Structures are given as C-alpha cells and as structure tokens.
Amino acid sequence: MKVIISGGGTGGHVFPAIAIAKALKKIDADIDIMFIGAQGKIEMEKVPKAGFPIQGLPVSGFQRKLTWKNLSFPFKLIKSLWLARKIIKDFKPDVVIGTGGYASGPALKMANRLGIPTVLQEQNSYAGVTNRLLAQKASAICVAYDGLSKFFPKEKLRVTGNPVRKDLILDKNEVAVAKAHFGLDENKKTILVMGGSLGARTINQAMDAAVEQIAERPDVQVIWQMGRLYEESFMNCPTAQLPNVHAMVFIDRMDYAYAVADVAVCRAGALTISELMVAGVPAVLVPSPNVAEDHQTNNAMALVNSGAALIVKDVEAKEKMWPATIGLLDNDKLANELSAKLLSMAKPNADSDIAAIAVSVAQKK
C-alpha cells in the first residue's frame, strides 16, 4: 500500500502529519509513505529527520493585504499543481492525506482529479478555506471538534481529535525529575507561560508589564518561554531577572513542562490545545488575532464554552493576563474543574484512528 501525506508551513500541520505517518507504519511496516511539502518551510527539515521522504512544491500563501508578493502567487500555484500531478502519477498512491498548509491544496486537488481517494484532517474548530474547498470530493474528514457540519458534509465527518506526541505524558514519579530539569522548587506551584517556538509578542509584553505583581508572589514560580524571535527584547528585562522566574528561549522537553505546570498561559493553536487536553493542564488562553479566519479565537471559545479553559483577549493581555492566571492558580476548585473537563475531551489515540480511516479508505478503492 502507498500513501502520500501533505501538510506543513507550521508545526501545527507538520507534527500531526508525522504522527499519522508513524501510526500507519505501526499498522503495517510495509506501507510506503511519501510527503509533499512547501519548499523552504519547516516540513522540509522535520519530515526527513523523522525518517520519511519528502518532495517540495514552490507554492506559498496568498497574502490578505496588498503586497507585490501576491503577483507571483498564480505562477507558483500553477507550477505546484503541475509538480503535484507528476509526483502523484509517479508514486501511484492508494490514498492521499492532507493535514493543511500551503502544499496540501495542490496535492489533494490533483489527487482528486486523478481519482485517488483523499482524507482531510482539520485541526481547528473553524475550518480553513483550503479544506472547505477540498471537502466535497474527500472520502473522509477527520476533525478535532464537534459542530463542523456547518463547513463539511456531515456523513464524511469523523471526530478523531488532533494527533499529539505519545511521549507527552509522564508518570507521576517522573515529576520530581522534571522539576529538577528546570531548576524548580518542588514545594512551589508552577505557571507555564509559552508562546510557541518563535514566541508571542503580546504574551511577552504582558509578562514584562507584570513584573511588580510577579515579584509580589515569591511563593509562585514561573517558566517563561519567550521564543527565538524575542530573546533580544525580553531576556534581560526586569521580569526575566526575578528569582521566581525561569526565563528561556525554547523548551526542549515539553513533556517535562506539562508535568510541572499547575496552570498554563498560551496561544490557542490547535496542537497546543490538543496537548493541554491530553496533559489536563488548566489554562488561560490568549488567542492570536493574526491568523486566518481568527481560528485561534474559535478554538479558545470551543473550550471556554465547554467549561475547559479561560480566555483573555490579545488586546487586553497587558492588564488582564497575569491577574487571570494567578486567580486561576489560587482557585484549586476551578483549576481542578478545568483539568477534569480537558481530560474528558482528550483523544490520545487520534493518530492511530486517522491512520485506520486512511487505510479503510484506501482498501475501499
């Protein structure tokens, strides 16, 4: 059996794609897998590191603001469609899986034209434009949230959740090791503040602004991951120098980070939310407004409306992020309620479920 997986542009598309590929190999080690990605994007590095071949398309995103970059978009798209067709005809897959991102559109569009069955994976609670366009010809659509029948044909929907790393959850006896890894006090509650590998400006600015409030709570310790883009701006700021703040650019052990966190503060990307669910870490979500269709706000509200998280608007973060976070940390009852609800919503077997659906679709062909 042969499978093409296309998705990338961000870790939120790439890591679920890799998880699905690994789950397919567990079903049958002889399954032949090829990735299609976008040239110059994160998948061109991460996929080969995971042990899978990948071919790149020159496709790029269409900018929603007026810019000269949009002039090259139609030419890149046409070339990407042609290359995707060639890759598919040469590889002859039994099924093509799309996890979103720039390359996913051309790859699945050409698969549909060539009569190859397709499986979509929509990670967000608000469906992206590309997946909406591809949905009519898809054999199955794997989603992370209920209620997406307003975007997709109901009979094609499969609520699988988003794939997360299997090594994310530690045994309780490993928590002490995790705290030692970050140099934390075992007897203090811990807040995890993160903005992704690149960082989140608003969250960092809110931490910078809260220096006096954080200093007033020496009984609380904070892991502050500020991201590569903001090391120069914030690593030497007063908040980062506080004795109860452990500032770092990048967290290499997210399993340790979730294990020690009593409360998290973060953006509301699909992958982050799925990890919070599996780890059961109560969170204050600060959705990024700078994403397509404002999907992070929709992701966050799906949790808020289910009683699984708190939300602070990006524009209000400086004033409200720290008070909301410390308020949640001090409210054991609320924190436990949010944690329990998150765990009840988690789907830790999403990767294997999606892989099984893809195999079933291929076999029907």
Image (cartoon, grey):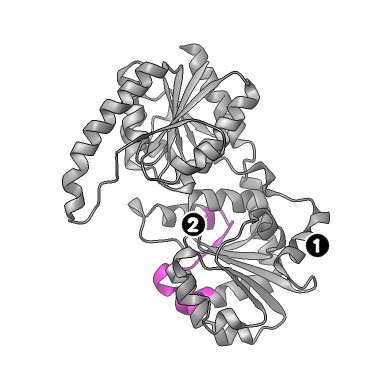
Q: In the rendered view, would you say 154 is above or below 287? A: above
Residue 165, percent from left and from top: 62, 44
- Tell which of 144 and 206 is nearer to you: 206
| Image position of 241 with respect to 333: above or below | below
Tell which tag, 1 or 2, sits nearer the viewer.
1
Question: How many C-alpha atoms fall within 10 Å of the one at disc 2: few (<14), some, or many (≥20)?
Answer: many
Task: Specify the amino acid type for callout 1.
Answer: Ala
Which of 222 and 348 lies nearest the eye of the viewer? Answer: 222
- State yes or no: residue 359 in magenta: no
Q: Quadrant of the C terminus?
A: top left
As helix, strand or loop, the secondary structure at mark 1 comes to: helix
Question: In the rendering, at what x and y percent does residue 261 appear?
Answer: 68, 63
**Residue drawn where x is 58% and y is 85% of the image:** 213
What residue do we see at 32% from left, 17% from top? 114
The secondary structure type at the circle numbered 2 is: loop
Q: Is residue 249 above or below residue 50?
A: below
Q: Which residues are magenta?
A: 303-321
Q: Does 193 sit above or below residue 78?
A: below
Q: Find the distance from the CA under tag 1 to the CA under tag 2.
A: 28 Å
Residue 25, how many percent across, how many down? Answer: 61, 26
Residue at 54% in and 37% down: 18
- For the point 58% across and 26% down, the residue is 24
Q: Earlier in the sequence, mark 1 or mark 2?
A: 1
Callout 1: 10 Å neighbours few (<14), some, many (20+)? Answer: some
Residue corresponding to mark 2: 268
Name the foreground residue: 318 vs 53: 53
What count of labels does the image hold? 2
List x then y, in percent, for residue 353. 59, 30
- Circle 1 sits on which residue? 176
Residue type at tag 2: Ala
